Amino acid sequence: MDSREHSEWIETTATVVSCKFQFARMNTMSLGLQRDERFRIAFDYYAHGQLYSGEFQSPVAMAQNKRIPIRYNPQLPGENSYSDRSGSAAGRGLFAVAIAGSVVLSLVWLLAMRGCS
């Protein structure tokens, strides 16, 4: 996180809601190797009187109800210092599109090959 870019963000405290261990998963980007960030941490925080949630990857486990410092964007309170660096939601969306595209292309290929016999 660039401190100049986020200097106007407001600091508050978030509460860890859950901490889940993630087993190594096969995918083309990691080649099935476990990353250092093995724990999926979910958290809640209040900003401008509303409850917001986020999650991030961590190399260490965190206890439920642990309080952690967090900074959030006052213009977009759902944007915070932990979720901002993760990019995991975008990565999951791209991964889902890639899987769907692969299935469609496979079906088209099978239909084309069936017509050749």
Image (tube, rainbow, N blue to C red):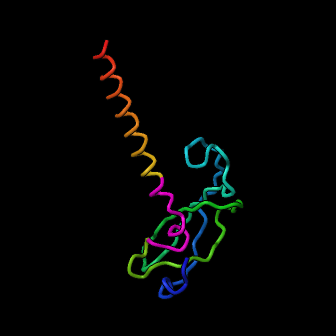
Residue that sits furthest to the left in the current view: 115
User: Which quadrant, please, contains the C terminus?
Assistant: top left
Residue shown at 38% from the left, 81% from the top:
75
87 vs 23: above or below? below
User: Which quadrant, please, contains the N terminus?
Assistant: bottom right
Residue that sits furthest to the top in the current view: 117
Residue that sits furthest to the front in the current view: 116
Q: Nearer the viewer, residue 83 or 63?
A: 83
Residue 16, percent across and down? 61, 65
Residue 70, percent across and down? 57, 76
Majority secondary structure in the magenta region = helix
Residue 37 occupies quadrant: bottom right
Residue shown at 52% from the left, 72% from the top:
45
Residue 76, percent across and down? 39, 76
Residue 2 occupies quadrant: bottom right
State the count of labels. 0
68 vs 38: above or below? below
**Residue 38 is a magenta residue:** no
On the picture, is 24 further left or further right than 82? right
On the picture, is 106 further left or further right than 26? left
Residue shown at 47% from the left, 88% from the top:
8
Give, as a single range, the part of the protein colored magenta.
79-91
Residue shown at 51% from the left, 58% from the top:
88
Q: Nearer the viewer, residue 105 or 75?
A: 105
